[in-house]
Image (cartoon, helix red, strand yellow):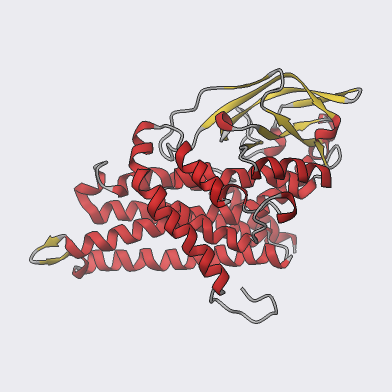
Amino acid sequence: MSMNGSINFALTDEQREIQMLAREFAKNEIAPVAEHYDKTHEYPWPVVKKAQEMGFTFLNVPEQYGGMGFSLFEEVLVGEELAWGCSGMSTAIVVNGLAILPVLVAGNEEQKKEYGGRLANGQMAAYCLTEPEAGSDVAGIKTRAIKNGDHYILNGSKTFITGATVSDFYTVFAYTDPEKKYNGMSCFVVHRDWEGVSVGKPFDKMGQHASDTAEVIFEDVKVPANCLLGEEGMGFLIAMKVFDRSRPGTASGALGLARRALEESITYAKTRMAMGKPIWRHQAIGHKIADMAMELEAARLLVWKSAWAVDAGVKNTTISAFAKAYAADAAMKIATEAVQVFGGYGYMSEYPVEKLMRDAKIFQIYEGTSQIQRNIVVRELFRK
């Protein structure tokens, strides 16, 4: 994307190369084993290890810390391709990029070097914000970190944490001063092997079975003061900055799933016959597929613009919310319509669209629900 003010929707040669690398990886490494991991609920270690070798687990870590140093626009190109193969596996791969964001947003040089380097060297990480009683209400978290000399004592629990069971460290949000509400929240890096850190067994989910989701519990964990990111009281601001950067990437996963659903529908509608002709020639099906394609294209343009805004340093809260809500809603709609195009076969698990529909739902929930995105849009529109 050109940054000089002129609008250009053509990818550069380098961006096309990145896109093709990710596309080949999805086609050769992810798609062939997607059904296996969906059915077994196993963590896809062989695929994740290969993704690490490709650098897909630390795309956003700057090169000086051992990462790929990708722009967010390049990240969303990769995100769409990986999720085309399987959004469960793509989530398992790219969640490290979310976990490291608080470090990149608020960490000092030493912290960036340390934790960026850990990801580049094959470690895994998870982002710990959501709690049993606080999801959409970020300020409602109960986890506490009380200063005690040169360390903090951390107590609380986090739930629905993607990557929890495989992570080596976590970025954790906790109140250091609950009296100050929003201004009393802080963010820490917490190591998995510290005393008092425990992880529950993975939840049994509707979809995205290849990514693990579990509870992380902190009981009197001693967190060294040098693991605080930024300053005390910056936690809420860090979380909001992270969301602005992470939502385009999450939305790109919804794009990949939606594109897969559209492609499967086109392939099926060419070969399935009804009343003597392929079903795409029946307007009821043809128009349905046309609408799916329009929704997908509109969603992609919003996602691209939201990523471009971050890279250009333009305030992107509204456009990121647009992209996340629109792409998530489109993915759910397109996946549901794909099942309809397949008819009875769409409902059977031996055909791919049944899995796509189950996997799609979470895009409307995680990283801020579609309703929360609309709340953000309303707030930004009426703030002006």
Task: Please report the residue visible at 40 percent of the width from the left and 32 percent of the height from the top.
Answer: 41
Residue under the image location 29 percent in, 68 percent down: 287
Q: Quadrant of the N terminus?
A: bottom right
Note whether residue 242 is visible: yes
For this orientation, the residue located farthest to the bottom is 6
Q: Which image quadrant is residue 294 in? A: bottom left
Of the pair 63 and 72, the residue shown nearer to us: 63
Q: How many marks?
A: 0
Query: Which quarter of the rendering shows the C terminus?
Result: bottom right
Seen in the image, is 91 located left or right of residue 69? left
Is residue 308 depicted above or below 373 in this figure? below
Give the percent coordinates (x, y) of residue 51: 52, 47
Locate residue 102, reporting x and y percent: 73, 44
Residue 230, quarter of picture: top right
- At horizontal 65% and vertical 61% (from top left) the residue drawn is 71
Measuring from the top left, give residue 228's x and y in whole percent.
82, 35
Q: Is residue 239 visible?
A: no
Query: Measured along the vertical axis of the image, is residue 288 above or below residue 187?
Result: below
Which residue is most to the left?
A: 276
Is residue 1 rendered to the left or right of residue 283? right
Instruction: Judge from the rendering whether residue 290 lies leftward or rightward of residue 327; answer left or right.
Output: left
Residue 202, position as x, y percentages in the image: 49, 27
Q: Give the image quarter of residue 231.
A: top right
